[in-house]
Image (cartoon, helix red, strand yellow):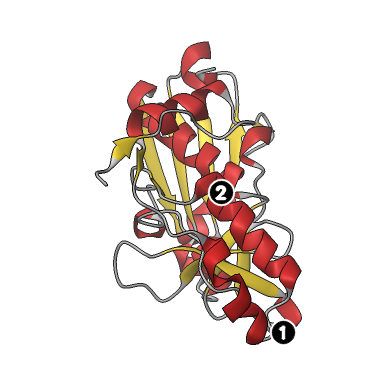
Amino acid sequence: MEDARVSMAPEGLSRRARYFVEVHGLRVPRPDMRRNRDVWLSHGIPAAEIDRAVAFQDRWGGIALPPAPVYEGGPRVLNADVPEDRADDGWLIPAGDCRVSMAYGFMIGPGGEFGIDAHRWTPLYASTDGWVESLALAHHARYWATSITKIKGAAIDAVDLDRYEPVPEVQGLTDTWWRSKDSLIAIYRGEAVGLATPQCREAHVYGGLDDWGLRGG
């Protein structure tokens, strides 16, 4: 089976994210997680965790999206795999293979959070929908901004967010997006938290945006 465009994005996304997935995404062949159920149960994986893996695969499995501006681009293709018990962090579900060799993997948390599993589990967004919304917003902002400024490390502490409001659709946790009257700011803290490397904090400031540039639907 050949790769194909995503004919219809998963329900519940913003108009901007639906357009991003359907125009820029590909659907590649995906394994059916249901075929693994009996084997996984025999290895002590709870049925509820298998159900979560199946649900993720049904919604997102096989979707390949353009690379993220950070995290070396994010998962190459969204795909579930064997749920993994992380003791205090609960059960995590792999979300797809990395594009390059990385010090961490992309996982789905016990509450559906999308994040990275490095020295510690670090949820980036409250759901995979939030991760995809962040990809769509970054793609949109890069196109419409008249200026893009990248800030790294301790310099992020000087970023003044008083005139900004959070962008709710990305469901930010460790990573967040902020909107003002003419600019967007994405703040990425995942590697800094997950790898205990504060110098890895990064902010992208997209300036000179009109109302369409700020929202895009």
Near-viewer residue (57 or 131): 57
Q: Residue at x 41, y 50 (%)?
A: 62
Q: Is residue 84 something one can see in this rendering?
A: no
Near-viewer residue (190 or 44): 44
Q: Position of residue 136 (x, y in %)?
A: 46, 34
Q: Residue at x 64, y 38 (%)?
A: 161
In the picture, the quarter occupied by the C terminus is top right
Is 41 positioned to the left or the right of 175 in the image?
A: right
**Can you tell which quarter of the image residue 207 is in?**
top left
Q: Residue at x 49, y 59 (%)?
A: 32
Q: Nearer the viewer, mark 2 or mark 1?
A: 2
Q: Is residue 66 something one can see in this rendering?
A: yes
**Can you tell which quarter of the image residue 143 is in?**
top left
Location of residue 45 with respect to 15 vertically, above or below: below
Near-viewer residue (37 or 105): 37
Q: Position of residue 60 (x, y in %)?
A: 51, 47
Query: Which residue has dot 2 on it?
Result: 58
* Residue type, mark 2 in image: Asp
Secondary structure beneath disc 1? helix
Task: In the displayed orientation, state which residue is furthest to the top.
Answer: 211
Q: Position of residue 20 (x, y in %)?
A: 42, 30
As drawn, the label of residue 87 is 1
